[in-house]
Image (cartoon, rainbow, N blue to C red):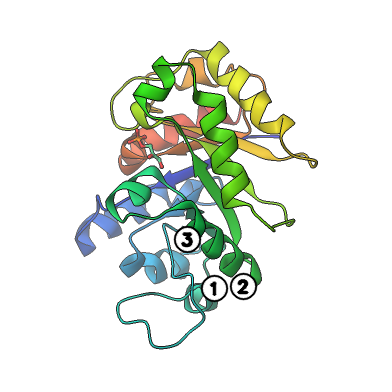
């Protein structure tokens, strides 16, 4: 089975021109990856039949929550997936495990497929604390949840830095994560995946796909990554 490819466009694209250009260049591979655009362009991607996810959403049912966006609304316009627990959201928006747990429940109640992002910082990595950190994040985020979700392992120190763990390290962590679940959980890798390193990263035997940030904003790079990952 070919791997899952997820394009997390973060807050990179800001103009209609950029988005239109992106959609035109990637039309031919739109069934081969899942795009997580800025929410203001979500409908545009959906109208063009891209498979879409969202980068975050409210933990609450529709109601008096100024500025928040309900999962119900996102599902209604056609989102299929949601990223939760991304390290940038944990850091910049102060989301803790309890809130992430509430958001996962909200998303699952609305039948969105959840990608839970987990990862250790450089200090924890250097102190060989990675597995403890990941286990803790998983246990807290998935408290009282039995539905199946997808995990994305994204070491914080590898995001946007051009650094990645070795293939052996990724394989070891992925098999550890899989051992924590009683179903056949899909585990993705994210963090500086690029057209330069995808050949090597694609050799990790137990990874089920890749979550790509910066490189996914360049259509040519994303197409190369998709080509390699589907081999
Ligand atoms: P980069 O690919 O830019 O390192 O970002 C990874 C990421 O955070 C994907 O969610």
First of labels 1, 2 by sequence position:
1
Please identify the quadrant where the N terminus is shown.
top right
Answer with mark 3 or mark 1, whichever residue precedes in sequence: 1
Query: Residue farthest to the right?
Result: 182
In the structure shown, which secondary structural element does the residue marked by tag 1 occupy?
A: helix
Callout 2: CB less than 8 Å from ligand 1: no
Dot 1 corresponds to which residue?
A: 75
- Residue 10: percent from left, percent from top: 32, 50
Taking the image in four quarters, ligand 1 sits in the one at top left
Q: Which residue is drawn at 37% across and 57% down?
A: 37
Q: Name the residue under label 2.
A: 110
Which of the image's four quarters has the C terminus? top right
Q: Looking at the rendered structure, which numbered label has been put on residue 99? A: 3
Precedes in sequence: disc 3 or disc 2:
3
Above or below 66: residue 135:
above
Q: Are marks 3 and 2 in contact (CB under 8 Å)?
A: no
> In the picture provided, is 96 more to the left or to the right than 188?
left
Q: Position of residue 44 (x, y in %)?
A: 38, 68
Q: Distance between the residues labelled 3 and 1?
A: 20 Å
Q: In this view, does 59 lie to the left or right of 4?
A: left
Q: Can residue 9 be seen in this view?
A: no
Front residue of this view, candidates 101 and 221: 101
3D distance between C-alphas at marks 3 and 2: 17 Å
Q: Where is residue 186 in the image (x, y as percent from the top left)?
A: 67, 39
Q: Residues within 10 Å of mark 3 (few under 14, many from 20)?
A: some
């Amino acid at each position: 089975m070919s791997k899952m490819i997820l394009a997390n466009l973060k807050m990179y694209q800001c103009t209609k021109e950029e988005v239109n250009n992106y959609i035109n260049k990637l039309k031919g591979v739109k069934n081969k990856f899942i795009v997580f655009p800025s929410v203001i362009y979500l409908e545009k991607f959906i109208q063009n039949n891209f498979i879409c996810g969202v980068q975050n959403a409210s933990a609450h049912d529709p109601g008096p929550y100024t500025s928040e966006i309900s999962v119900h609304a996102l599902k209604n316009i056609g989102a299929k997936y949601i990223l939760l627990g991304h390290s940038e959201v944990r850091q910049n928006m102060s989301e803790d495990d309890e809130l992430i747990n509430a958001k996962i429940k909200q998303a699952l109640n609305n039948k969105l497929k959840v990608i839970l992002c987990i990862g250790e910082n450089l200090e924890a990595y250097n102190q060989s604390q990675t597995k403890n950190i990941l286990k803790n994040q998983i246990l807290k985020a998935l408290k009282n949840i039995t539905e199946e979700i997808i995990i994305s392992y994204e070491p914080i120190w590898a995001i946007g830095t051009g650094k990645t763990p070795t293939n052996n390290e990724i394989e070891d962590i992925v098999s550890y994560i899989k051992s924590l679940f009683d179903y056949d959980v899909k585990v993705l890798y994210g963090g500086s995946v690029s057209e330069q390193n995808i050949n090597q990263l694609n050799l990790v035997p137990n990874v089920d796909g890749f979550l790509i940030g910066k490189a996914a904003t360049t259509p040519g790079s994303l197409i190369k990554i998709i080509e390699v990952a589907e081999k």
